[in-house]
Amino acid sequence: MRLRTLALKFLKIGATGFGGPMALIGMMHRDLVETGEVSEETFSEGVALGQMLPGPVALGCATYLGYKLRGALGATVSAGALLLPPFALMLVLSPLYLHYGTVPQVGGFFKGVGPAVIAIIIATGWRMGRKSITSYRGAIVAAAVLVAALLKLHPAILVIGGGLLGMLLAPTPRQEASS
Amino acid sequence: MSDLLQFCLLCARTSLLVFGGGLVMVPLLQYDVVERYQWLTQQQFLDALALGQMTPGPVLVTVTLIGYKLSGFPGAILASISMFLPTFLLTLFCSNRLQRLQGHRWVKRFLWGARPAVVGLIVAAGIMLAQQHLTAPGPIVLGILCLGALVLTEKIDTSLVVLASGLLGLALWSGQ
């Protein structure tokens, strides 16, 4: 695929990809797999990599697909093109928000979005929990971190601590097979 | 250390810790941005998140606004680069090594603990934000409605949920 085509495809996804990570993944599938340019297998590898590594799943997937199509340069183009439209939009919105965000006429708008954002955060926690907490040991780690976070321990320490705890406590394949 | 440099370092660290999706940045950033350094008020942080949700693409662009608040356009650009470059480079580095990583015992064990930890963090952030913000009956009802819509319908567009409740707020609570 030509770099220009790659850039245009991801610019389009970046500009129209509303509605969270799954919506973005769906668009990539539509614009790259359903057109026959990327195989189903490569695409699932990209999603798996995005889910495994830190960072937005869609960005990880875009980076991997760009890499598979055109190497490191392709990865830079696809990731950059995906991020450029939302970044540019945010550059325009930031000064507008900081200058006019407290004007009473638009204050109501931000009073309205607060509850929606909080609901999205809780729903995301619920959805991620259903997917990633599969054993009682995992549930204990989640509960312990929840309490520690409410007690104001630093979140970065809690993520790394959770990972280190996993290295100590995760069941070995043999234990998994016997349980 | 200047605030912007400090924030860029925070973004770079967050970039390498948001396991499982961009929204994990909420607890990771809130602690330092709102409570420790008070670059933004709680309300501004929520507003920034709402704008990040309403714009297309990954919600991590929220940091563009925070960077802008700290030092204008250069701040916005530097903060965004700090947020996206580390995860991009890591992904690029791992693109060749996917099979080996997926089967790697210690990677698996690390993620086994980090994934539930991230769930605990997000839920805690949701609880704390709800306690501070959902104090009047109107916002409480709106929050419950949104949560119901999000949990019951798997495929609902989150940008649309934010926009719709913003417009509802505009109609109900403007000028107060």
Image (cartoon, helix red, strand yellow):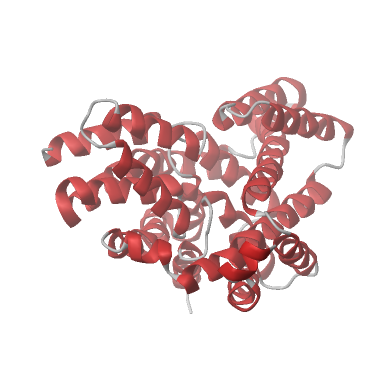
Residue at the spot 54% in from the left edge and 38% down from the top edge: B53
Q: Is residue A126 left or right of residue A90?
A: right
Number of numbered discs on residues = 0
Residue at the spot 27% in from the left edge and 45% down from the top edge: A65
The image quarter in which residue B157 lies: top right
Query: Which residue is more in the foreground, B6 or A77?
Result: A77
The quadrant of the picture occupied by the C terminus of chain A is bottom right
Residue A81 visible in the displayed image: yes
Query: Which residue is more in the foreground, A150 or A37?
Result: A37
Q: Is residue B34 left or right of residue A60?
A: right
Residue at the spot 79% in from the left edge and 51% down from the top edge: B127
The image quarter in which residue B160 lies: top right
Counting from the top left corner in percent of width and height, residue A159 is at 61, 68
Query: Which residue is more in the foreground, B174 or B152?
Result: B152
Q: Is residue A37 left or right of residue B117?
A: left
Please identify the residue farthest to the front as the structure is shown: A178
The quadrant of the picture occupied by the N terminus of chain A is top left
The correct choice, above or below, for A129 with respect to A136 in the image is above
The correct choice, above or below, for B117 with respect to B45 in the image is below
Counting from the top left corner in percent of width and height, residue A168 is at 62, 79
Please identify the residue farthest to the top as the structure is shown: B171
Counting from the top left corner in percent of width and height, residue A48 is at 42, 50
